Amino acid sequence: MYRRSWATPASRPPRSTPRLGRRKSRHRGARLGKFEICPTAQEGGGLMGYIEKIMGDQEQIVYRTHRHIIVLFGRVLGSFFAFLVFVAVGLALLLPPAGKEGDQVRFYVGLIALGSLVMPLYLIVSAWIRGLRGREFIKSIWRAVLAGVAILIVALLLMFSPGFKAVGWIAIVLAAIPLLDTLRIVADWLNEQFIITNRRVMEVRGIINKHVRDSALEKVNDVDLRQSLMGRLLGYGTVQIITGSDIGVNMFRRIANPVRFKREMLNAKEQFHASGKPPADEEKTIPELIAELDELRRKGVLTEEEFQAKKADLLARL
């Protein structure tokens, strides 16, 4: 008779229990008080941003801010307005039906587009009023001039050649130019930062090509804060840093939270001086200083009267 044998639990081969893998902990910038400690390049690797990469060992971020959002609105106003005008003109040429009624609609849209030239003119005049001249003036207004010329050409074609629908497609294509310029301005605004560390004050600008300007806290002589009534209501202002370097003055215009920026900078400067290494004379004991004075007396550097006066002054500190 066949007898079926069952394997006992002891005779079974031991199961290989899977080993629990340890989670790899990513090193992140630890916070010490209100400071953000920057990880080193070997520990942080590719997780660090550009700002952390240019910071020194044990350098800590105290505070960071950027330009106020009202600056962004002022920069994108012209480009975004041109984008809306080109889109409206293109749709006005392509969507209305052919015929007399469609021509009237296109003519009125052309008049509106012609009236929108007030915006490029406003940008040009405002740049002149701000005192920009020469290359700075041309650099500030060339986009407004280009947008104004394009709007003028499209508006005239829309008014006097309403049946030319190719202009509508041209306007739609041209709308991509101010749209891309608007996105570029937003990216510039996001990448422009003003940073205070426990060693220096930095201004970082640029998307691909980075520009960094910094001033050491020990060279900061004075900080000037300027806020208009509108700036106090909306929370922006201009901070002027006067240093002892060759440049002399760093101007941070219309930054967000300027009062806190100035306060954090002054606090960081005070802590920087308070944590400075004391002079070597203060680290030595009084007997060691007296021994050094006696050595100078034997070498003839100090006279007996000067040695006794210095010795009495040191003994009086005990």
Image (cartoon, rainbow, N blue to C red):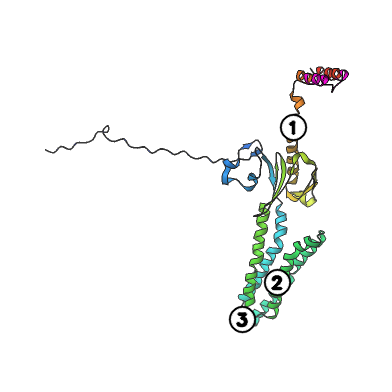
Q: Are marks 3 and 1 in contact (CB under 8 Å)?
A: no
Q: Secondary structure at mark 3?
A: loop
**Mark 3 or mark 1, which is nearer to you?**
1
Image quadrant holding the N terminus, namely: top left
Query: Residue 135, percent across and down?
Result: 78, 61
- Asked if residue 300 is among those painted magenta in the image, a careful observer would answer yes
Q: Which mark is residue 98?
A: 3
Mark 3 to mark 1 CA distance (whole Å): 79 Å
The stretch of residues the image draws in magenta is 291-306
The dot on residue 274 is 1
Whether residue 200 appears in magenta in the rendering, the answer is no
Image-based side of 12 in relation to 102, left or right: left
Which three-letter amino acid code belongs to the residue tagged 2? Ala
Q: Position of residue 62 (x, y in %)?
A: 69, 40
Percent across and percent down for residue 17 are 36, 37
- Residue farthest to the bottom? 100
**Which circle's residue, 3 or 2, is located before the other in the chain?**
3
Residue 264: quarter of image: top right
Q: Secondary structure at mark 2?
A: helix
Task: Write the residue at 65% across / 82% down.
Answer: 100
Question: Of 141 and 175, which appears nearest the observer?
Answer: 141
Whether residue 126 is visible here, answered yes or no, is no
